[in-house]
Image (cartoon, rainbow, N blue to C red):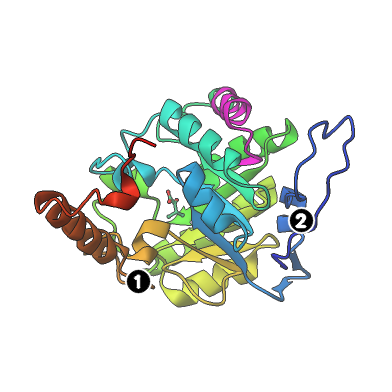
Amino acid sequence: MSTTFQLDTATSRANPTPSPMKRLTVPKIRAHKTGGTTAEPLVMLTAYTARQAQLLDAHCDILLVGDSLGQVIYGLPSTVPVTLEMMANHGAAVVRGSYHAVVVVDMPFGSYEASKEKAFESASWLLKQTGAAAVKLEGGAAMAETVAFLNQRGIPVMGHVGLTPQAVNVLGGYMARGRSDAEADKIVSDAKSLDEAGAFAIVVEGVVEPIAIAATEAVSCPTIGIGASARCDGQVLVTDDMLGMFDRVPRFVKQYEDIAGVIERTVERYASEVRSRAFPGPEQTYQPK
Ligand code: KIV
């Protein structure tokens, strides 16, 4: 999918505020996979703040306001304590900081599992608060009825199978899934159930490669891999992992930069200049005229 922006300042009743460019839509993302194949993989990254969204937007098809913000932003031990309010605040910031990518907001643990009605209440509130186009929720066949219910009522849903971090207390850790026949069969059938229920895309996380490929081939909607396979229809990473904000990252993360190192070295210089009174210098101070 091309990430070249089209300038479009025309207004209409549907879009009364001119926006500098047209945003991609969920149907366009869904239509990216046609006849079971995807020519160019979809690019998805997590974003949690307006400035981060501004920097990523031009290069991404989808910005995911992931509940990984629990660990990345809030220093929580897992995604389990993340609340709807946290997701709404960061989702709104990411929508404000982007014009091009489709923004998808994660539904946090406890906000959708109890019933499809509860899921609709949480998801509709999230879309109203943020202006995002879609939600993501974790789980396979068990969530299919909910996915269909939301989709039929105007809420596009991205599914998430394989390693589902909100289920860490059931899974017992974050190890790759699909090593046994039973697990492998369940991942593929979970993906199929979500596809049939109308999910517009499915994240396949932490799954041994042949099973990620089997799931991708089994569904008509695009799969987005993370720790899965280059043969998925798209890829996602947690942006802070890929930028090198953390020392330790899962094996499937490629660290493209060492931003933590850049920050540490920069702050060290600042601290030393403050302590030696080299900062602020004449350029950063006001003098009487
Ligand atoms: O919360 C998140 O960031 C995610 C991605 C890792 C897919 O769900």
The residue that label 2 is drawn on is 28
The residue that label 1 is drawn on is 255
Q: Residues within 10 Å of mark 2 (few under 14, many from 20)?
A: few
Can the viewer see residue 139?
Answer: no
**Total numbered labels:** 2
Q: Confirm whether the magenta stretch covers residue 28.
A: no
Residue 209 place in picture, x, y as percent: 45, 76
Report which quarter residue 147 is drawn in. Answer: top right
In the rendered image, the quadrant that contains the N terminus is: bottom right
Q: Give the magenta part as a residue range.
A: 119-136
Secondary structure beneath label 2: helix
Tell me the distance, in whole angstroms, between the alpha carbons under discs 1 and 2.
30 Å
Secondary structure beneath label 1: loop
Q: Main secondary structure of the magenta part?
A: helix
Can the viewer see residue 92?
Answer: yes
Residue 210 place in picture, x, y as percent: 48, 77
The residue sitting at 85% across, 32% down in the picture is: 14
Q: Mark 1–mark 2 contact, CB under 8 Å? A: no
Residue depth check, mark 1 versus mark 2: number of the one nearer the observer: 1
The residue sitting at 59% across, 38% down in the picture is: 96
Report which quarter residue 181 is drawn in. Answer: bottom left
The residue sitting at 63% across, 67% down in the picture is: 218
Residue 200 left/right relative to 261:
right
Question: Which amino acid type corresponds to the residue marked 1 in the rendered image?
Answer: Gln
Residue 265 left/right relative to 182:
left
Residue 215 place in picture, x, y as percent: 56, 66
